[in-house]
Amino acid sequence: MHRGRQHVLQSHHIFPRARIRDVHGRCEVNEIANRAFIGGGTNRWFSHTPPSEYLPGVVKERGEEALVAQCVPLDQALWQLDNYPRFLAYRRAELVKAINGFLDGL
């Protein structure tokens, strides 16, 4: 069994608040489409790093499935800070599909 803060599941801002809060409103920064669930140690390691810098490493280490499982787009253009609104639109739609698929399976 894993114990300690390093192993606690945390809600991670995919696009770090510090990188986008001056451009986007608080609701848009904190919305569910900008959140992923990861371990505490990983969350601290990513810290304020933009997704364009850390997501390629996730794909290299864990494969595309790691992103697909959390409905994160594979299109690297959507990982750029300037494309945050497009990222949110994509991820909102994918989260809805995933939730509906789960509910349909019940």
Image (cartoon, helix red, strand yellow):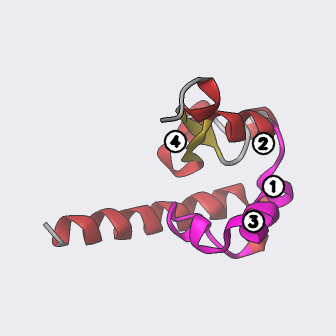
Q: In the image, what residue occupies the spot 53% across and 34% down? A: 2
Q: How many dots with numbers? A: 4
Q: Earlier in the sequence, mark 3 or mark 4?
A: 4
Percent x, y for residue 103? Answer: 20, 64
Q: In the image, what residue occupies the spot 82% across and 60% down? A: 52
The residue mark sitting in front, 2 or 4, is 2
Q: Given the current orientation, which residue lies at the most extreme top position?
A: 4
Kindly check if marks 2 and 1 are in contact, taking CB atoms under 8 A apart as contact: yes
Q: Quadrant of the C terminus?
A: bottom left
Residue that label 2 marks: 46
Nearest the viewer among 63 and 47 is 63
Q: Which residues are magenta?
A: 48-75
Q: Measured along the vertical axis of the image, is residue 77 above or below residue 33?
A: below
Q: In the image, what residue occupies the spot 51% across and 60% down? A: 70
Percent x, y for residue 23? Answer: 76, 40
Q: What SS does tag 2 mark?
A: helix
Q: Earlier in the sequence, mark 2 or mark 3?
A: 2
Q: Earlier in the sequence, mark 2 or mark 1?
A: 2
Q: Is 84 on the left or on the right of 81, as rendered?
A: left
